[in-house]
């Protein structure tokens, strides 16, 4: 693998120490308790991405075969009071070596009691309810090499305490060892004209990636309404990036305060969804929201098939400088679930810019074959992209992705 920054990260002393502690605790658990449950699983997948148009920038390729592996190991003892969890990930891309990377998605110890839980290590946390954007989801860095929509995340070192009360669940987080976002190389697609080098992006804080971070979230429900309120203080996961007139790039990870609110209400077949954030920093402030509904037609014609229709409005007051180009857009789409033994399902939709001609069309689907195989498909099409938006840089990067995975 040529991505030395990812390899360097993987073999850092901190993570090697965590892995050693994980192995030690596994041995201790097996030696001291007869009530031990273990499970080893994972998958090996082959992926092929094909870009429909010739690249805009020199060196860009069209065909991207790749492979990945994701092993998982889980152990619990004393009736689930103590848990160790490990999820690794490795990618080899045969065209763009910058996509090669190794990662520990999760590696943590957890103790569970009646009304509280505590865990320490590398962990992934997801917050949010909407489909088109994930505004309040701030804890983990995006794995930019694996996903266009930001749904794949890197593990984050944290101590996580969760306390359950009659007034809701309180989650407290203490974090450090920030992880930078990685970007495609010269051969890759969905990149800027001058490929972004991870190390080119700097930190606002003099402490860099070692800066301590904290977050708190309260979540509860009132009848059909689920609510979550969160606050994060630390280094923002999204860099502030600008391209100069001479083509050079400037980028920095700012120190931010981010307050988020997520709501979801269920009224019969309708889900009402809302996410909003306010982000403050010395470099850039922002406000954003995503509000929408999902209406589900269940068991259509007695077939067992469910069809959910989705509609969301997205707003970002940063306007054209927002990396996601979702400054004022509408998402329309659907979720088709066949509810068969193969778990066949599709998610499709389009994001329409309210003020411009830009359209982004997407399709995702997957289906199991037998007990051990799953096939997936993904499509992204950029249409009539305005030259005033950041994704104008990707306007020729329509692609199809096929993936076949063996699960063990």
Image (spheres, rainbow, N blue to C red):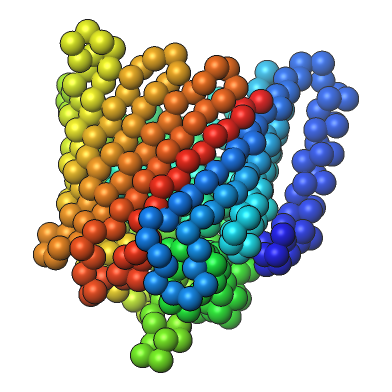
Image quadrant in which you'd find residue 3: bottom right
- Residue 213: in sight, yes or no? yes
Determine the residue located farthest toward the top in the rendered image. Answer: 302
Number of numbered discs visible in the structure rendering: 0
Name the image quarter holding the C terminus: top right
Image quadrant in which you'd find residue 264: top left
- Residue 106: in sight, yes or no? no
Q: Which residue: 70% across, 24% down?
A: 39
Which is nearer the eye, 333 or 406? 406
179 sits to left or right of 164: right
Where does residue 323 sit, x and y in percent of width and height?
Answer: 35, 67
Determine the residue located farthest toward the left in the rendered image. Answer: 355
Q: Which residue: 73% across, 23% down?
A: 38
Name the image quarter holding the N terminus: bottom right
Where does residue 389 sit, x and y in percent of width and height?
Answer: 26, 71
381 sits to left or right of 193: left
Determine the residue located farthest toward the right in the rendered image. Answer: 31
262 sits to left or right of 183: left
Q: Which residue: 54% across, 34% down?
A: 404
Where does residue 391 sit, x and y in percent of width and height?
Answer: 32, 66
Q: Is residue 344 above or below residue 322?
A: above
Where does residue 384 sit, x and y in percent of width and height?
Answer: 20, 63
Q: Is residue 25 above or below residue 176?
A: above
Image quadrant in which you'd find residue 10: bottom right
Which is nearer the eye, 394 or 148? 394
Q: Which residue: 35% across, 71% down?
A: 393
């Amino acid at each position: 693998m040529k991505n030395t920054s990812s390899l360097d990260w993987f073999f850092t002393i901190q993570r090697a120490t965590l892995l050693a502690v994980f192995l030690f605790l596994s041995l201790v658990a097996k030696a001291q308790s007869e009530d031990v449950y273990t499970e080893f699983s994972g998958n090996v997948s082959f992926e092929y991405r094909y870009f429909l148009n010739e690249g805009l920038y020199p060196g860009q390729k069209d065909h991207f075969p790749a492979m990945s592996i994701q092993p998982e190991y889980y152990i619990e003892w004393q009736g689930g009071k103590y848990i160790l969890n490990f999820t690794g990930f490795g990618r080899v891309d045969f065209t763009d070596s910058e996509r090669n990377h190794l990662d520990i998605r999760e590696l943590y110890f957890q103790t569970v009691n009646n009304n509280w839980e505590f865990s320490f290590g590398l962990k992934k946390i997801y917050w949010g309810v909407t489909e088109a954007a994930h505004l309040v989801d701030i804890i983990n860095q995006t794995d930019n090499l694996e996903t266009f929509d930001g749904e794949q995340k890197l593990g984050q070192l944290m101590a996580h305490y969760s306390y359950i009360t009659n007034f809701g669940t309180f989650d407290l987080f203490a974090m450090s060892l920030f992880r930078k976002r990685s970007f495609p190389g010269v051969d890759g697609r969905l990149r800027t004209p001058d490929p972004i080098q991870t190390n080119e992006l700097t930190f606002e804080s003099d402490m860099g990636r070692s800066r301590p971070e904290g977050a708190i979230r309260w979540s509860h429900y009132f009848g059909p309404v689920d609510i979550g309120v969160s606050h994060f203080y630390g280094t923002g996961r999204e860099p502030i990036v600008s391209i100069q007139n001479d083509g050079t790039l400037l980028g920095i990870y700012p120190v931010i305060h981010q307050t988020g609110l997520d709501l979801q209400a269920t009224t019969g077949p309708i889900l009402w969804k809302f996410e909003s954030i306010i982000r403050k920093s010395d470099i850039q402030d922002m406000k954003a929201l995503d509000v929408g509904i999902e209406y589900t037609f269940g068991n259509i014609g007695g077939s067992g098939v469910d069809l959910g229709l989705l509609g969301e409005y997205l707003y970002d007051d940063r306007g054209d400088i927002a990396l996601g180009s979702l400054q004022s857009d509408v998402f329309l789409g659907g979720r088709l679930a066949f509810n068969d033994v193969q778990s066949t399902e599709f998610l499709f939709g389009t994001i329409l810019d309210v003020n411009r001609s830009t359209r982004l069309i997407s399709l995702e689907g997957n289906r199991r074959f037998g007990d051990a195989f799953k096939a997936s498909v993904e499509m992204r099409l950029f249409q009539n992209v305005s030259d005033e938006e950041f994704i104008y840089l990707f306007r020729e990067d329509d692609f199809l992705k096929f993936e076949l995975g063996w699960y063990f």
